[in-house]
Amino acid sequence: MDCTYKNPNAPIEDRVKDLLSRMTLQEKIGQMTQIERSVATPADLKSFSIGSILSAGGSVPFQKALPADWADMVDKFQQAALESRLGIPLIYGIDAVHGNNSVYGATIFPHNVGLGATRDADLAQRIGAATALEVRATGIHYDFAPCVAVCRDPRWGRCFECYSEDTNIVRKMTSIITGLQGKPPADYPKGYPFVAGRNNVIACAKHFVGDGGTEKGINEGNTILSYDDLESIHMAPYLDCISQGVSTIMASYSSWNGRQLHADHFLLTEILKDKLGFKGFVISDWEALDRLTEPRGSNYCYCISTAVNAGVDMVMVPLRYKQFMDDLTFLVESGEVLMSRIDDAVERILRVKFVAGLFEYPFSDRSLLDIVGCKLHRELAREAVRKSLVLLKNGKNPENPFLPLDRTAKRILVAGSHADNLGYQCGGWTSTWFGGSGRITIGTTILDAIRESAGDETEVIYDEYPSTNTLAGQYSFAIVVVGEPPYAETLGDNKELVIPFNGSDIISSVADKIPTLAILISGRPLVLEPQVLEKVDAFIAAWLPGTEGRGVTDVVFGDFEFEGRLPMTWFRSNDQLPMNPGQNSYDPLFPLGFGLTYNKEKKP
Ligand code: GLC
């Protein structure tokens, strides 16, 4: 039988059309369905031709599962999918947002806010390529990244997932997509999805559109803007993503002028697909359809018809998938959702699968296993840490800089809640959805790094919350590392933005007695009281650096120069928020783009 869709040499659009023509309504709806791994069964994958599975944050085969265990799990699901009537391969998705962060031992890169401080598009691309390798090594095909939100208010719990408040910085960092997916050839058709090969992943630009502009930074809130402002501030990065061949785009939980994005046909279809020419597929967010009604998930048929008719192609259900499939079947049979809409959605999904080569290479490539957490990637992450650090103060007077510190000093005091906590320095979306504390994976804390870098004769004293007795000792200088605990999404929404765990008091108590460098580990700018800033001899914003703490000491001890510049405005007090350049009330403690160096102050 002439199966064009099985012919790897046939044009992709011919393969899509041929396969679509052979599919039943149930198989089409199966392809539009993404389910969580915890509810996936080989039997259902096979009988319903389910299109995709995902790991929610922290949804792992088992604790400390090795890459081979991940690949075994994904390949087992894939085998079941290939046993379906038409043998359509599934795509397995995960949030690898700063490395393959759910996988124990994976390289954890700085979160996006730190990468935004580097403004280094080439670095972002190299990180994308490394991340893609560590994702494919685990058998996974699909990465719900990058987040290209433009964070206009640091009270938003997802500020750390954003490159900047400045649209142009975000636009520049979309280069990560050509690392994740590979770089399309110059004459590649505009808006068409691209995946170079087996060392690359299907990427996902998210969350379309305006998620970073909600009122008061409330997660999943309402972005009140004219269309022109929505387009120029929040939509612009998507044009760069589409021009770089991004294969999928995730709709935002948030609303625009009171209309939920998942229900917005104008933005999802008329703008994104028709005007911008996006030819990949639009995926919903987690249970986002359920959020279209109150109480959540009530009148599910209405939720489904609204979202699918608005332009959602694949639905991250992800648990009650049988009801989803039954209800969508009913909606098509009753004419509420036209078959032409279903066909458009399935064409887009199949197109991405063909482009990604999954019909030819559906299973994991075991030759990649050792690449997870490899030295080369950790060195890349260390480079990213170096370039992300922003020096806000260096010396109580400019003529007498405090940094670089002397690694051969006689006695160093290291203090603070974040000096020796790998989970804290990685932040959210690490090991679990909202991260953790302590040795949650393999890496180097800032204290480890100080101990490794210090001279043989140097005594390093560590006291997380130094007593007066400790402070009475003799030290060459102190390094105090404080900051935020990990968080994710709404858990991170915060109006006060003060340094947690009495971080300011720790800094003050140490700086009162000892020349002090303060390092802040956070997903965003936090309140810096003038008297605290006054007391310290130097201050570094280190964002959420990930596993490679040596990147911090590389710069602090002077082996490398500071390059980072603020990706976010550093406000004086939270009652100024939201505060972005261009407002006449723009009166920051440190402006967007600020960053000192060892040689001269950098102009924004
Ligand atoms: C979450 C996030 C989204 C993520 C998805 C799958 O709720 O909003 O960024 O990709 O669910 O984990």
Image (cartoon, helix red, strand yellow):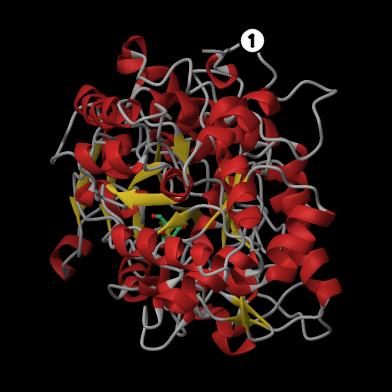
Query: What residue is shown at x 21% (from left), y 36% (from top)?
Result: 42
Q: In the image, residue 174 lies at what x, y percent?
A: 67, 43
- Taking the image as drawn, is residue 566 in sight? no
Q: Quadrant of residue 102?
A: top left
CB at disc 1 and ligand 1 closer than 8 Å: no
User: Residue at label 1?
Assistant: 9
Which of the image's four quarters has the C terminus?
bottom right
Query: What residue is shown at x 64% (from left), y 10% (from top)?
Result: 9
Query: What residue is shown at x 56% (from left), y 41% (from top)?
Result: 349
Q: Quadrant of residue 149?
A: bottom right
Q: In the image, residue 123 lies at what x, y percent?
A: 62, 32
Q: Secondary structure at mark 1?
A: loop
Looking at the rendered structure, the number of numbered marks drawn on it comes to 1
Q: Nearer the viewer, residue 128 or 384?
A: 128
- Image quadrant of ligand 1? bottom left
Compared to residue 210, the image places residue 41 above or below, namely above
Compared to residue 559, the image places residue 393 above or below, namely below
Q: Is residue 162 left or right of residue 565?
A: left
- Taking the image as drawn, is residue 586 in sight? yes
Q: Nearer the viewer, residue 357 or 500?
A: 357
Q: In the image, residue 216 lies at what x, y percent?
A: 57, 84
Q: In the image, residue 408 lies at what x, y percent?
A: 36, 31
Compared to residue 573, the image places residue 416 above or below, namely above
Query: What residue is shown at x 48% (from left), y 15% (from top)?
Result: 360
The three-letter amino acid code for the residue at tag 1 is Asn
Q: Is residue 369 left or right of residue 23?
A: left
Compared to residue 220, the image places residue 69 above or below, namely above
**Would you call the spot at circle 1 few (<14 residues within 10 Å), some (14-19), or many (20 or more)?**
few
